[in-house]
Amino acid sequence: MALSKDDFSQFSDFATRLADAARRETLPRFRAGANVVNKAGADYDPVTDADREAERAIAAMVQDAYPQHGIIGEEFGERTADGPFRWVIDPVDGTRAFVCGAASWTTLIALEHDGSSVLGVIDQPYTDERWLGFGGGAQFVRGGKAFEARTSGLTELSKARISTTDPRQDGYMTAEDVDAFSRLAAATRLARFSLDAYAYGLLAIGELDIVAETSLQLHDYAALKPVVEGAGGVVSNWQGEPLGAEGRGEMLAAATPALHAAALEILASRK
């Protein structure tokens, strides 16, 4: 059953309250010596008390307001749903940025209905910026003032501004991924790195034109799709398929269908 306008209004209001609750946990800990733990053994995958406490706060609110809804979070796993709804939480996307004091980390909150992301929030507390995508539209809020979020509308690859979190081999990309991304970046005007999910927010307000990444998990991308598409952008994996279809966590987001097609032609031809 399709969601109504009233459904979207109810859930979007609740999602903003979840983001507010996460802010109360993350913002006081940012640039304040948050406790950092490496959760990946020989590799380095940091987690902080900000990640954990923000996820706890969000999950508690969901369980109280919608006990029949499922929850899946980066830090504490999954609670199965009794119905068609599930909240997908990444309490601090960009923990490496967080521990370095860089204000490019975000809190990501998505609502799935029958397995599809229908609502997404990208929230950056330190800069007081929030993106909300739902019902085929997107909104950008800064300093309490709301604006319609729209992509740049760019169609020419040679004029595009592109981003990825880490273009190095064995970071998040294989050698083949690095080669394909390098060829795509070379065809654009400029590239910027290490923005994590914040890059998709910038794309949604016309400040970037393409974001291409690999090795994403559901909690990394579930909130991004409603925001980018609601702002007029296009999202797929690197073969033009739905997100997650290939199992490699690929994502290609672009400002327009024409720009997406041009980028896809390069990425899909990787060796």
Image (cartoon, helix red, strand yellow):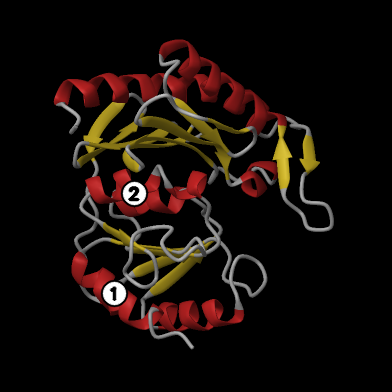
Observer-nearest residue: 235 or 124? 235
Question: How many marks overall?
Answer: 2
Q: Position of residue 177 (x, y in %)?
A: 53, 77
Q: Earlier in the sequence, mark 1 or mark 2?
A: 1
Relative to 25, is 124 above or below? below
Relative to 84, is 237 above or below? below
Judged left or right of residue 124, residue 236 is left
- Name the element at disc 1: helix
Residue 117 — which label? Answer: none
**Residue under the image location 39 percent in, 52 percent down:** 200
Q: Position of residue 271 (x, y in %)?
A: 49, 88
Judged from this view, the residue extending furthest toward the top is: 64
Mark 1 surroundings within 10 Å by alpha-carbon count, few (fewer than 14), some (14 through 19), many (20 or more): few
Q: What type is the residue that disc 2 sits on?
A: Lys
Relative to 187, is 35 above or below? above
Q: Position of residue 106 (x, y in %)?
A: 51, 40
Whole-Å distance between the Cαs marked 1 and 2?
A: 23 Å
Residue 225 — which label? Answer: 2
**Residue under the image location 51 percent in, 54 percent down:** 195
Judged from this view, the residue extending furthest toward the right is: 42
Observer-nearest residue: 103 or 22? 22
**Residue under the image location 77 percent in, 51 percent down:** 40
Q: Quadrant of residue 240?
A: bottom left
Tell us which disc is closer to us: 1 or 2. Answer: 2
- Name the element at disc 2: helix
Q: Which residue is mark 1?
A: 159
Q: Position of residue 59 (x, y in %)?
A: 53, 22
Judged left or right of residue 73, residue 110 is left
Mark 2 surroundings within 10 Å by alpha-carbon count, few (fewer than 14), some (14 through 19), many (20 or more): many
Q: What type is the residue that disc 1 sits on?
A: Lys
Relative to 94, is 158 above or below? below
